[in-house]
Image: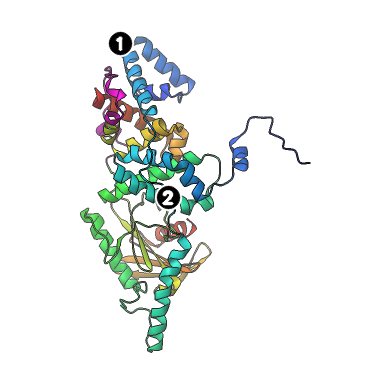
């Protein structure tokens, strides 16, 4: 049975069922300081309710329109792709600093491992050359958790790439979002996530799952096994 | 001639959802800016942190408007604000708040009975300073309940925690505020 003293706030708020209410009223009738506790809590509640509203120091302004973001970033990627193709090179899989979105799965894995080091060491910073994103308007999918205790810990990005980092305190899962034009080719074993086409690879003890989602590629990297990763990927693309 | 008939029965949540149009971003900024900023300030305790949080909230609002179901705009906005706040706290810590969620006694022991000096409660800045001493998850529950005015069920949905946990966090939060302000 719950200690009736622990129910005093819910009693004040009218949030108890009849049996609990009777329990609290019996407590109040007999406990020497029961009424004083209740009055003290009521004073705090009143004071909180009476805290004044505050005016923002400046008027709120509209954030940038999200659709513009991907387009703005896609243009340099397309230009870079055209330039590389004209030069007779394949864009995909190269470490091309002029098109940072075109990262191959190895580079995504390295960013994931950076995120693991950050989480394990409790250090500030961001994976690789990424920075913490202040403007989230371009992030298409950003669920707050992925189930299984995986909570979102940070959102990082650079041109053409967003990395969301999740942790349950022990393991880390990274979710990458890239515009399709700037993403690495989808390689590996074909599979489906929901009704979406996906590719799976095992690399360096991690599972890498790439899912085609509209004009984007969502890549989920983690160590918890393909089934849990697939469930998390499904949750991300449907968010 | 077109006549309007009002429902004879009490308006249900579903009815309200049908009757209330989805607001535009501009309407939210104009009509709810003060509300969002106040919740953000109560959670963060500083003008600059509240400003940063409000910017994060506005982006989330913009993204979320397409899926917003009319009915409880302030409940929705306060949910977004507290979740953005808790995200920022988690980012700052870089680790999950492993001591907070379930082990209430260790984090915030229940207080003994004692009268609070009511004079101290007349100073909003004292109460705001005391709020900042609460762990973030407790502060979020207390702010949603006592500043925003949400029911325990609505707080439970906003924070994705069971109602029993809401009840405990609000009680422990208020009790701790009493202790601090004595």
Q: Residues within 10 Å of mark 1 (few under 14, many from 20)?
A: few
The image position of residue B91, as x and y in percent, is 29, 51
Q: Secondary structure at mark 1?
A: loop
Total numbered labels: 2
Q: Residue at x 44, y 19 (%)?
A: A21
Looking at this view, is A216 or A209 the one in front? Answer: A216
Label at residue B58: 2
Image spot of residue B172 (x, y percent): 32, 29
Residue B82 appears in view: yes
Mark 2 → mark 1, Cα distance in angstroms? 49 Å
Can residue B101 be seen here? no
Name the residue beneath numbered marker 1.
A32
Q: Is residue A228 magenta?
A: no
Asked whether B69 or A115 is in front, the reply is: B69
Please give the chain letter of the residue carrying mark 1.
Answer: A
Q: Residue at x 44, y 21 (%)?
A: A20
Residues rendered magenta in the picture: B99-127
């Amino acid at each position: 049975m719950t200690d009736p003293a622990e129910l005093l706030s819910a009693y004040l708020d009218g949030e108890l069922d009849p049996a609990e209410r009777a329990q609290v009223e019996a407590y109040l009738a007999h406990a020497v300081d029961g009424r004083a506790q209740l009055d003290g809590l009521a004073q705090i509640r009143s004071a909180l309710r009476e805290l004044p509203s505050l005016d923002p120091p400046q008027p709120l302004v509209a954030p940038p329109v999200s659709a513009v973001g991907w387009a703005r970033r896609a243009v340099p990627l397309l230009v870079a792709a055209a330039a590389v193709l004209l030069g007779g090179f394949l864009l995909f899989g190269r470490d091309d600093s002029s098109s940072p979105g075109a990262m191959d799965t190895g580079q995504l894995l390295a960013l994931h491992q950076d995120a693991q080091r950050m989480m394990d060491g409790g250090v500030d910073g961001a994976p690789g050359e990424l920075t913490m994103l202040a403007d989230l308007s371009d992030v298409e999918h950003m669920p707050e958790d992925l189930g299984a205790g995986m909570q979102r810990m940070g959102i990082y990005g650079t041109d053409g790439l967003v990395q969301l980092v999740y942790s349950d305190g022990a393991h880390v899962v990274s979710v990458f979002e890239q515009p399709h034009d700037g993403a690495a080719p989808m390689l590996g074993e074909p599979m489906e996530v929901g009704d979406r086409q996906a590719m799976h690879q095992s690399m360096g003890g991690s599972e890498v799952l790439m899912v085609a989602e509209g004009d984007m590629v969502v890549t989920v990297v983690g160590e918890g096994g393909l089934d849990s990763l697939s469930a998390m990927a499904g949750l991300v693309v449907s968010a | 001639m077109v006549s309007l008939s009002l429902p004879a029965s009490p308006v249900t949540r579903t009815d309200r959802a049908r009757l209330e149009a989805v607001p535009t971003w501009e309407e939210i900024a104009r009509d709810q800016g003060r509300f969002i900023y106040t919740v953000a300030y109560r959670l963060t305790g500083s003008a600059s942190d509240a400003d940063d949080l409000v910017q994060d909230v506005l982006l989330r609002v913009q993204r979320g408007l397409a899926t917003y179901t009319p009915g409880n705009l302030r409940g929705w906005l306060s949910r977004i604000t507290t979740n953005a706040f808790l995200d920022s706290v988690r980012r700052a810590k870089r680790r999950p708040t492993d001591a907070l969620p379930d082990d209430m006694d260790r984090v915030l022991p229940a207080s003994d009975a004692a009268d609070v000096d009511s004079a101290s409660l007349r100073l909003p800045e004292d109460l705001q300073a005391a709020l900042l001493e609460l762990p973030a998850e407790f502060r979020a529950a207390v702010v949603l309940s006592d500043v925003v005015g949400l029911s325990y069920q609505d707080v439970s949905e906003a924070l994705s925690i069971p109602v029993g946990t809401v009840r405990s966090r609000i009680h422990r939060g208020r009790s701790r505020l009493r202790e601090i302000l004595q």
